[in-house]
Amino acid sequence: LLFGVALIAALLAGYGMASSPKISWLQTILFAAALSITLFTIMDMEYPRLGFIRMDLADRVLVDSLQGMRD
């Protein structure tokens, strides 16, 4: 689904810029930045122990629950 949305957004951006003889560098850079930030965020959330988005509190709750079950 995410790939499809990115493809449609790229097609719409390309279609909008096709009528102009000059390349709009601002639109190109903003689109590339938005796509890069989105992919980085998805990858960061995929590996919660390695990136900026951490799940340490959730891990602590799971460890405490496990310790409670063992006692």
Image (cartoon, rainbow, N blue to C red):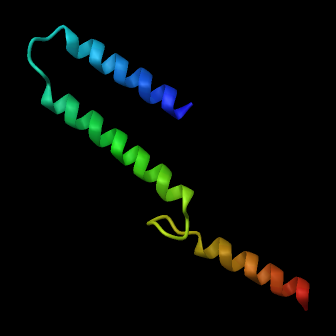
User: Where does residue 23 sit, x and y in percent of width and height?
Assistant: 12, 22
Residue lying at 52% horizontally and 34% vertically, measured from the top left: 2
Q: Is residue 36 left or right of residue 61?
A: left
Report the label total.
Answer: 0
Q: Nearest the camera: 30 or 43?
A: 43
Residue lying at 89% horizontally and 88% vertically, measured from the top left: 70
The C terminus lies in which quarter of the figure? bottom right
Q: Residue furthest bottom?
A: 71
Residue lying at 42% horizontally and 46% vertically, measured from the top left: 39
Examine the rendered structure and indicate whether residue 42 appears above or below residue 16. Answer: below
Q: Is residue 31 left or right of residue 42?
A: left
User: Where does residue 51 sit, x and y in percent of width and height?
Assistant: 46, 66
Q: Could you say which quadrant of the image residue 8 lies in?
A: top left
Q: Is residue 24 left or right of residue 32?
A: left
Q: Residue furthest left?
A: 22
User: Where does residue 21 sit, x and y in percent of width and height?
Assistant: 9, 11
The N terminus lies in which quarter of the figure? top right
Q: Could you say which quadrant of the image residue 28 lies in?
A: top left
Q: Could you say which quadrant of the image residue 17 lies in?
A: top left
Examine the rendered structure and indicate whether residue 38 appears above or below residue 53. Answer: above
Residue lying at 29% horizontally and 12% vertically, measured from the top left: 15
Q: Is residue 71 left or right of residue 9?
A: right
